Structures are given as structure tokens and as C-alpha cells.
Amino acid sequence: MGLSGSAMDLPTALLLGIVQGLTEWLPVSSSGHLVIFEHFSGVRPPLFFNIALHLGTLLAAGWLLREDILRALRATPRALRAVRTGTVDPDERTVLLVLLASIPTAIIGYSFDTLAASWLGSLRITGAGLLATAGVLWLSRGRGGTFDTATVPLAVGVWMGLAQGLAVLPGLSRSGLTIAAGMAAGMRPVAAARLSFLMSMPAILGATGLELLQDREGALAGVAPAEFLLGMAAAAIMGFLALRWLLMLVEQRRFHWFAPYCGLVGLALLVL
């Protein structure tokens, strides 16, 4: 998020959609890969096109998690009342976890927004962030317990929200940090992953809305309908496939497989 500027052609829109769809959900940092793409291609995607890519990945997650989302939406009014009564069912607990995660994410994201924008575009910072992501992923191997969203302490929502907030910095993977945080807190890997994806939705929508408010006049610059639709479709399709693959790897306790990739790319960027 945050790149803006020159117009593009259809092949570039397709490539960016594929990159965004894969890296938004896989624990390899989508912001880091957009920095790399911009540096070596010289293309600065318009803000509205970036928003289209994120909407595509949100559509992918929304379809995959549609049942979880519908249950959470129905449970939201009950969850707010349940805080007073102290009796919370599993769906209400999911809503509370997402809400609690959103608070530190919003605070950190807003506080670090200027710093993250100044670092966006730096290969050195991105490389360091990818190395940190690699370390977190490698340390996550063998982690995970028996908690799911129905039994995990509500404080874990805040813990995962802190991890999500830090991922505003380039090279730090949002999915990598949040899933690893949930596993470290004793959640089952798949439960941590599904909660991470649900947490991401208000975070991505909030970040998108903030960028639109900050650049309302330039948001539509350089946007062509064909590029917009192609990029969003590519991001949605690749995002869905990436989500399915990641859930399979997490269930097989192979989440740390992405650590060598992040480490090698991070080292390469530091050398460059």
C-alpha cells in the first residue's frame, strides 16, 4: 500500500495482480514485494490500482471464509451485549477477538504511518524486514497448541493485533507475524491462520480508507478500467489459491517452509 504515480499497461497490471494475490496471504510480505517490483521495474502503480488489488485479495478471503464471516456478522450485536453479561458463545468470541485485535493494529498503524511511508521504497529496510520475518517463521516450527477461537483467552486477540500492527513496516509479513503469534500463544495452527485472515479484513479496509482520505485528488490518476479489472481479478484468483495452499501447509505444520525464501531475498536486498 502507498505506491502511487505512473500509468501502466495490461501485462504490468496482470503481473502486479499475481504478485499481490500471492504475497498478501503467503507469509512473505506483500509490501516488501511491491517495493522490489517498483525498484526494478520503475513502475509506480496508481493509488486506486493498489486499492483494486487489495479488494481482489479481500474478495478471495471473503469467499473462502464466507461461513465464518456470516456467523460473525450475525453474532456482532450479541457479542457487544455479551461483554456485559460475561457469557460468550464461540461466534461472539470470534467477534471480540477481531475487535480486540483491531485496536492495537489501528494505534500502531496510525502512529507508524509516516515512518512506514518514509521507509517504503528502501531495499535495505525491506531486506531487514524480510530477515526478521524469516526469523519469526523459523522460530514458529513446532509451535501451536490446542486452543481455537472458542477457547483461546481474549488477550490473544490483543497479542495478534500488536503483531499485525507492526506489519505496516515493509518486509514484515502480516500473515507471518500474526499466525506465528497465535501459534506461540497456544492456538492450533489452522485456527490461528483463520483468525489471522479474519483480523486482516478490517485492517486492510481501514488502511485503504485512510489512504483514500490522504490522497482523494490523486487516487484516480492513471487508472484505466481494463487494467483495474484485470489486476483485481488476478489478485482475487491468485489470492484464493494462495490461501488454500497456506491453510494446507499450516495444517501440515510446514508454515516455516517460507523462512528460507524470506531469508534469501532479505540477504539479497541488503547486498544490493
Image (tube, rainbow, N blue to C red):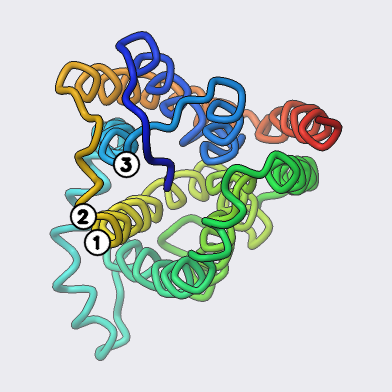
Task: Tell me the SS state at disc 3.
Answer: helix
- Residues under numbered marks 2 and 1 in contact, where contact means CB atoms less than 8 Å apart: yes
Q: Where does the image place residue 13, in percent across and percent down from the top left? A: 34, 18
Element on which disc 2 rests: loop
Which numbered disc, 2 or 3, marks the residue that appears first in the sequence? 3
Checking the image for residue 70, the label placed there is none
Going by the image, does 116 lie left or right of 223? right
Q: Are marks 2 and 3 in contact (CB under 8 Å)?
A: no
Whether residue 146 is visible here, answered yes or no, is no
Q: Is residue 21 visible?
A: yes
Label 1: element kind = helix
Q: Is 128 on the left-hand or right-hand side of 213?
A: right
Q: Earlier in the sequence, mark 1 or mark 3?
A: 3
Number of numbered markers: 3
Q: Position of residue 65 (x, y in %)?
A: 29, 39
Question: Which residue occupies 30% across, 21% down?
Answer: 231
Can you identify the residue that label 2 sits on? 216
Task: Point out which mark residue 213 bears.
Answer: 1
